[in-house]
Image (tube, rainbow, N blue to C red):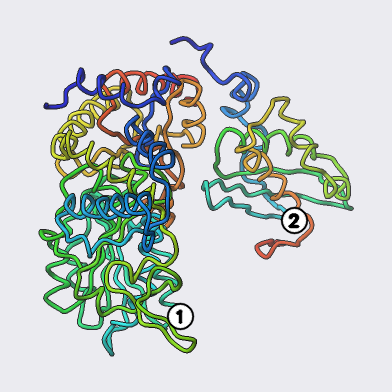
Amino acid sequence: MIINNDVAKKLKKDFPIFKNNPKLIYLDNGATTQKPNRVINTIKEFYEKYNANVARGFYKQSQIAMEQYQNARRIVAKFINAEAEEIIFTHNATDSINSVAYAIESIIPEGRDEIVLTEMEHHSNLIPWQQLAFRSGFKLKFIKIKDDFTLDLQDAQEKITKKTAIVSLTHVSNSLGTINPVEEIVKIAKSLGVLTLIDATQSVPHMKVDVGKIGSDFLVFSGHKMLGPTGVGVLYGKRELLEKMQPFNFGGGMIKSVSKESSEFADLPEKFEAGTPNIAGAVALAEAITYIDKIGVDNIHRWESELMKYLIESLKKVGDIVLYNVGLKNTSGILSFNIKGIHAHDVASILDSYDVAVRAGHHCCMPLMKRLGIPGTVRASFYFYNTYEDIDKFVEAVKKTKEKFGR
Amino acid sequence: MTDSNFPERMYKEHILELYKSPENFGILENATHKHTETNASCGDEFTMQFIIEDGKIKDVKFYGSGCVMSTVSASLLTSKIKGMEMEEAKNLSRDDVLDLLKIKVNPGRIKCVLLPLYAVKNAITHTHRETLKI
């Protein structure tokens, strides 16, 4: 079923928040998406029917909980073309990156003491590396962005060298919506034996992400930005690397045997999941993925592109709008803009009075905003349940804001 | 969609008017005290400039950029303290400034309103590391 405006309207009915807030125009999906009935019901059903801890429960409910948790891992793995053992459940993408930034020290070869990031990273893919740099005396380098909001690939080639330990970059910029050529950058890194991490938080919910095709060593994303609950995220790592890496969290669930003096760690993936995991969260995330898969990520990407085309055309007609956008071809469903002379926070406050939910500010990308020479932007971000009517109401509210505030 | 949708509580007509043409905006020649206050998270930045003689604020102007709330607050505050004893200005409270706006400010925007107050206090007390006496 190809998504068009009618289908989007129908899909919106799967989300109870819109029934409870009939006026809500939700364009803050980059921050978190809304949750469909089936995900909410999965959580409810889990706690009402199967709730038990996983592992070593010899009773029926625990076995069902275990089966569901393992099945969730298989569903996540299949969705990004990985193996189940390569999927570690974390709290969110930030947690996943922090975990890698800690554990990676055990596998970085001698003589590699540089970390390469880009100027468009979310703070979650910057601060964990800053801390690693402080801890270990590593140096941070940043791939520049060009004035058209794309990465400077020539700069990438100069900055990724045999001294680089890891390249960590975002697949889709949470501020600009730019889709980065991650396959190319991973190829450059691989040719020099450099480790790679892709922050796929803004791509996995919206377009096909295949870890085999991208080829990165690690890839991370959050469940709540793809219809799942908060508190569950994913760390994908290549099996051979995860096997080599030392765990970074210790405790129950991640061991084979323990003596007073030392312990033998469990095999993948349990080795990296100390303590009771977010079982219901993982099961609900798998339900979200099943629903997304039924709609189809390519279908979602195509519909969001259509909405984006319509949004950009509509905003251009308003006038006095500055777009921070790379052009339709390389854009996901995220658009940053400013109304000339009006502070982004004022715009967002006014839009809220029209029941339009957007984000305004630096979007956890203060270095990027500095590079762009602005304090912040207003950001509209889609998901498949957004419609042309949502955009019309949004643009109308932008017009009103401009009229009222223009000076 | 009508104008009645507007958040009248905050963006009242007198606020918007002052935002469009703030008072005491511009460069003050021969300033004796000056301080730039920045809110890094939203990018607002205002510089307060003073001519202080015999412990009295003879003149004050500000320049910089910010949202409606911080701009209007800077305009109202500079008008209030012009001619004021320095000691009195030092003791201005958060509520003194919030009262000037005559609106109910959303909790998330209170820091915008208070930015100019910090700039004033830092300029005249020299407590801030960026404070510059010229």
Point 75% across, 37% down: residue: B97
Confirm whether circles 1 and 2 share one chain.
no
Q: Which mark is residue A44?
A: none
Residue B71 x, y percent position in the rendering: 61, 36
Residue B68 x, y percent position in the rendering: 57, 33
Q: Identify the subunit bearing mark 1.
A: A
The amino acid type, in three-letter code, at marker 2 is Thr
Judge by depth and name the residue closer to the eye, B88 or A84.
Answer: A84
**Vertical relation: A139 (above or below) A183:** below
Q: Distance between the residues labelled 1 and 2?
A: 45 Å
Disc 2 residue crowd, few under 14, some 14–19, many 20+, Cα 10 Å? some
Q: Which mark is residue B32?
A: 2
Q: In this view, does A232 lie to the left or right of A172?
A: right
In the displayed orientation, state which residue is furthest to the front. Answer: A59
For label 2, the SS is loop
> Which residue matches tag 1?
A135
Judge by depth and name the residue closer to the eye, B123 or A240.
Answer: A240
Residue A292 x, y percent position in the rendering: 22, 38
For label 1, the SS is helix
Residue A185 x, y percent position in the rendering: 17, 64
Point 22% across, 44% down: residue: A326
Check contact, mark 1 vs mark 2: CB within 8 A. no
Judge by depth and name the residue closer to the eye, A336 or B64.
Answer: A336
